[in-house]
Amino acid sequence: MSDLGKFAASVKKGKFPKICLIHGNEDYFISRSVDLLMEHVVGPEQRSFNLDVFDGTESTSEEVLSSILSFPFVGEKRLTVVRRFDKMDRKHRLDIASHLSDVPESNVVCLVAGEIKPSDEPYKSIGTIGELLAFNRLRGPELSEYLIDTSKALGKELGTGAADLLVDMAGDSVGDLISEIEKLSLYVGDNKKIEIDDISTVVGKSRSFNIFELQRAIGQRDAKRAHEVAAKMLETGEKPVYINFMLAKYFLNLLEVKHDLSKHMNPKDISTAVFGRYNPFINEYVSAARAYSINELKNAVGVLLDVDTRLKSGGFEDSEAMAVLVSEITGKRADRVA
């Protein structure tokens, strides 16, 4: 059972942490855990009296303390939620933390933050009084397992290979992935299993401009398509550092595929050697590896490392970085393919 599942089971049984700091970088888990507290700590008919929600960027410690130190009105429980607690002025955070030991037994206090250092104050002090609950992004097998369990809850079977493909195509945001699984469940109808072809069809249609499509365009040396996809990804808020990182990973895999091709290995064996499993897109990897020479693949990795350094040092605008990496890797400038 996932950490969110354990938390949900406890809350649904009426076992609430009196004081908790929920933090991490997986917004879906954090948002769902706060929703669970709102659903179960205070009944719908009492929320107008016994539920207060604050934004740390707009609230003061005086306002928050007035809520967390007040007794419930016409009810047994009172819930105070402070979103973006980590963005609140440090003086106010320290003031709130210093009064948490005075919170009445009837009250539940939920402080919400992004990525923090639990050893820093006031988080360390909060941890000695209440609970620190970290919800971070799942990676690799953990994420695939979570998607498989989520599919089971919807009455569908999702294999490991299909789960990996779904992550490859839709990214690692749990909220987005769950949305895709829900759409896939409706798409397959009475079929109990979500197949790889279903994912390619449904997710491919809804996500024409993603890292998967950008890799495909660059792998085919289709510079015009690659520039178009990269531009659309930036428009929808994708971070160039993430795009660059994923492309670097892609080309390192292509180098391994190229090496295995030189040993006359077949695609199935190459897939196992490079990815540790059967990759449904191994033929595309093989095709891309054949489209580039060893020196070109090594040059691509060098270009991506250089772009990464310049992005992090502020030496590149986002759109300029994408134009440079596509042009340098494919050997075709944007103005020549427009």
Image (tube, rainbow, N blue to C red):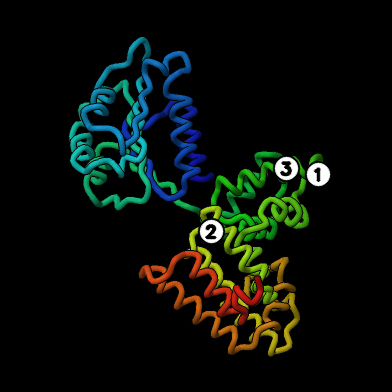
Nearer to us of marks 1 and 2 is 2
Residue of label 3: 185
Q: Nearer the viewer, residue 176 or 336?
A: 336
Q: Amino acid under label 1?
A: Asn
Q: Percent position (x, y) of residue 28?
A: 50, 43
Q: In what element is the residue under mark 3?
A: helix
- In this rendering, is residue 242 above or below 110? below
> Is residue 221 something that shows in the picture?
yes
Residue of label 2: 234
> Which quadrant is home to the N terminus?
top right
Q: Do labels 1 and 3 touch, CB within 8 Å?
A: no
Q: Amino acid under label 2?
A: Leu
Q: Neighbour class for label 1 at 10 Å: few (<14), some, many (≥20)?
A: few
Q: In what element is the residue under mark 2?
A: helix
Residue of label 1: 191
Nearer to us of marks 1 and 3 is 3
Q: Neighbour class for label 2 at 10 Å: few (<14), some, many (≥20)?
A: some
> Is residue 245 something that shows in the picture?
no
Residue at the image position 30 percent from the left and 44 percent from the top: 86
